[in-house]
């Protein structure tokens, strides 16, 4: 009581007691010093969650790899579509054509098969365009095709002579079945024909006259 009197009574006069009243206030909460806490432990799971997710781009134009890979895929499909014996024969044919192409002083360049293609092919290009390619086929014999737009009529007629029946394997592009190239003499003639065409492509017009 005495403490209240001292706190709120301002003075005592003739007219009574003057009281200065201060409404009670809430006591201020003591300041809290933040406590240091260790950061959460980093685990493989948290790193995986925090890391940005990489989205693979479509394999539309991504090359599948090397000549070794394309050759292996080619021979696998040959065995699947034809036979193991055909695979052994066609491997010799393919190796011969690859060796000839690689011996042309860099004029004919291997072109990897696009990764999106399930069809196995072996392809070589001249000046950016397909010069020749080879395709295993499910219902038809594995074929070798000259694709370049030069001397096609000439090669159509000559390739027909390499066929067992003497008929062109295609009416549009010079094509010959791999089974008709198993004899070494047939491959020798094919490489001779390709060499003649390549020679005309790389020689100046004046030199061809």
Image: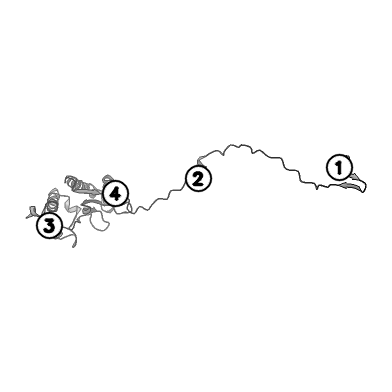
Report the residue marked by disc 4. 73
Q: Say whether residue 35 is left or right of residue 150.
A: right
Most extreme residue toward the bottom, as rendered?
A: 171
Residue linked to disc 1? 4
Q: Residue at x 84, y 42 (%)?
A: 7
Q: Quadrant of residue 163?
A: bottom left
Mark 1–mark 2 contact, CB under 8 Å? Answer: no
| Residue 50, disc | 2
Closer to us: 34 or 4: 4
N-term-proximal mark, 4 vs 3: 4
Q: Residue at x 23, y 48 (%)?
A: 110
User: Which residue ends up furthest to the right in the rendered image?
Assistant: 14
Which callout, 4 or 1, points at the residue further toward the start of the chain? 1
User: What residue is pinned by disc 3?
Assistant: 158
Q: Is residue 44 left or right of residue 151?
A: right
Disc 3 vs disc 1: which is toward the camera?
A: 1
Q: Residues within 10 Å of mark 1 (few under 14, many from 20)?
A: few
> In this orientation, which residue lies closer to the viewer: 71 or 138?
71
Disc 2 to disc 3, C-alpha distance: 65 Å
Dot in front, 4 or 1:
1
Q: CA distance from mark 4 to mark 3?
A: 29 Å
């Amino acid at each position: 009581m005495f403490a209240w009197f001292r706190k709120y009574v301002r003075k005592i006069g003739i007219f009574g007691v003057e009281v200065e009243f201060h409404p009670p206030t809430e006591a201020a909460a003591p300041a809290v010093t933040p406590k240091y806490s260790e950061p959460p432990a980093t685990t493989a799971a948290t790193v995986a969650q925090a890391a940005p997710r990489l989205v693979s781009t479509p394999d539309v134009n991504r090359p599948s790899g090397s000549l070794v890979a394309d050759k292996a895929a080619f021979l696998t499909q040959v065995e699947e579509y034809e036979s193991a014996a055909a695979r052994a024969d066609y491997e010799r044919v393919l190796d011969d054509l690859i060796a000839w192409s690689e011996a042309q002083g860099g004029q004919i360049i291997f072109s990897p098969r696009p990764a999106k293609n399930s069809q196995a092919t072996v392809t070589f290009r001249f000046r950016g365009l397909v010069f020749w390619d080879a395709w295993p086929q499910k219902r038809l014999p594995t074929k070798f095709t000259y694709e370049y737009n030069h001397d096609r009529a000439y090669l159509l007629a000559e390739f027909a002579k390499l066929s067992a029946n003497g008929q062109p394997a295609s009416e549009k592009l010079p094509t010959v079945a791999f089974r008709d190239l198993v004899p070494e003499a047939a491959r020798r003639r094919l490489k001779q024909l390709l060499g003649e065409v390549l020679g005309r492509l790389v020689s100046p017009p004046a030199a061809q006259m």
